[in-house]
Amino acid sequence: MDYDSDGVIRAEWPTSGHWEVTPMLWATMHWTLFTAPGWSILGCATAQCALKGGGNFASLVSPTGDDATIIVETFTHAASRCIRNDPSDWVVAPTQNVTFALSSAAAAVVDHLEVWRSCSSWRYPADDDGYMQRLSDLPVTNSTATLVAERNCCYTLTTLRG
């Protein structure tokens, strides 16, 4: 099996000093830049926090409850095949509206969420991929925020700034 780009950094020629960042590093950054040790993952009402149009999400909250981060992943089977235990194929809509309801306490102090996006077809290397792109803030209205999510992307919605 070909393991090319399965790690976070590719360094096949160590004596040359050449190394390359892979899509896995960018996906990992969505989970690590906007959380910290001690944050809690919130439970979901749907099985595996599934999105109606395909994909999934996770919601995390800081120990004090002052900050929150939501990670949304919309990767297709072809873009996220597992090298060890490959599940059956699944379908992801080209775009989908994903609405999140914030608690009334959070909505009282949050009027927008920062949005970061990384899109990858996981062809390596791919010039058309885009990583850790800062998008426009997502407004919070009536305690909800709606994201238009594209297929084969990872999004981070967060109360953390910068």
Image (cartoon, rainbow, N blue to C red):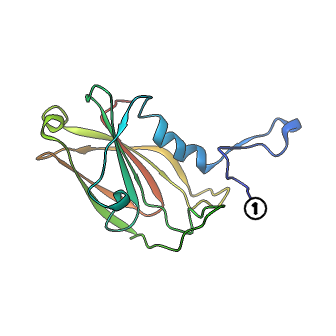
Q: Residue at x 40, y 29 (%)?
A: 38
Relative image position of residue 46 (x, y in whole percent): 29, 60
Locate residue 123 relative to residue 53 in the image: left or right.
right
Quarter of the view holding residue 67: top left
Location of residue 126 in the rendering, given as x and y in whole percent from the top left corner: 63, 58
Quarter that holds the C terminus = top left
Q: In screen coordinates, is 101 left or right of 162?
A: left
| 92, above or below 132, in the image | below
Compared to 63, does 75 lie above or below? below
Q: Please, which residue is most extreme toward the top here?
A: 64
Horizontal and vertical percent position of residue 150: 40, 61
The residue that appears at 51% across and 40% down in the rendered structure is: 29
Taking depth in this image into account, of 79 and 128 the one nearest to the observer is 79
Q: Which residue is pictured at 53% across the width and 68% down the height?
A: 77
Residue 124 in the image, given as x and y percentages of width and height = 67, 57
Of all residues shown, which one is farthest toward the right? 15
Of residues 100 and 47, the one drawn nearer to the viewer in this rendering: 47
Under mark 1, the amino acid is Asp
Mark 1 neighbour class, 10 Å CA radius: few under 14, some 14 to 19, many 20 or more: few
Foreground pick, 52 / 147: 52
| Mark 1 lies on residue | 2
Instruction: Specify the quadrant of the image occupied by residue 110.
Output: top left
Q: Secondary structure at mark 1?
A: loop
- Identified at 59% across, 48% down, the residue is 24
